[in-house]
Image (spheres, helix red, strand yellow):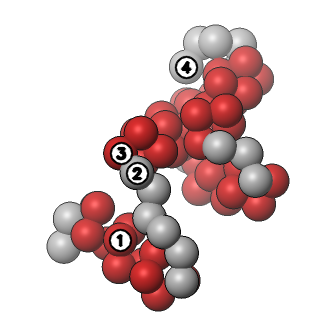
């Protein structure tokens, strides 16, 4: 199963829509910024926090880059 197939299937199980291509990319970049600016464990939790706060992946990515000092 590919990453997209997994995410699509998991979204169905959760009763929600999967991320579109732009959101998918932004979430991966957000995870990368969090993992490189801190420890790898910050990646999934940062994505969860963005979702919990209702912040769009692209906006969360911009904020994470700001927190990381633009280095990531």
Question: Where 32 falls versus 67 (above or below)?
Answer: below
Helix or strand or loop: what does disc 1 sit on?
A: helix
Marks 1/4: CA distance? 28 Å
**Residue at which label 2 appears:** 20
Q: Earlier in the sequence, mark 4 or mark 2?
A: 2
Marks 1/3: CA distance? 12 Å
**Is mark 1 in CB contact (under 8 Å) with mark 4?**
no
Observer-side mark, 1 or 2, equals 2
Residue 21's label in the rendered image is 3
**Residue at which label 4 appears:** 72
Residue 41 in the image: x percent, y percent? 61, 53
Task: Name the residue at 38% across, 68% down.
Answer: 7
- Residue 52 horizontal side relative to residue 30, left or right: right
**Is mark 4 in CB contact (under 8 Å) with mark 3?**
no
Task: Name the residue at 35% across, 79% down.
Answer: 9
Marks 1/2: CA distance? 10 Å
Question: Where 6 falls versus 69 (above or below)?
Answer: below
Task: Name the residue at 26% across, 69% down.
Answer: 5
- Location of residue 1 (image quadrant): bottom left
**Residue at which label 1 appears:** 8
């Amino acid at each position: 199963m590919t990453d997209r197939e997994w995410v699509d299937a998991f979204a169905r199980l959760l009763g929600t829509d999967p991320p579109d291509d732009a959101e998918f990319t932004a979430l991966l970049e957000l995870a990368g910024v969090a993992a490189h600016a801190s420890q790898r464990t910050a990646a999934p939790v940062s994505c969860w926090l963005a979702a919990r706060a209702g912040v769009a992946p692209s906006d969360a990515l911009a904020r994470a880059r700001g927190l990381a000092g633009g280095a990531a």
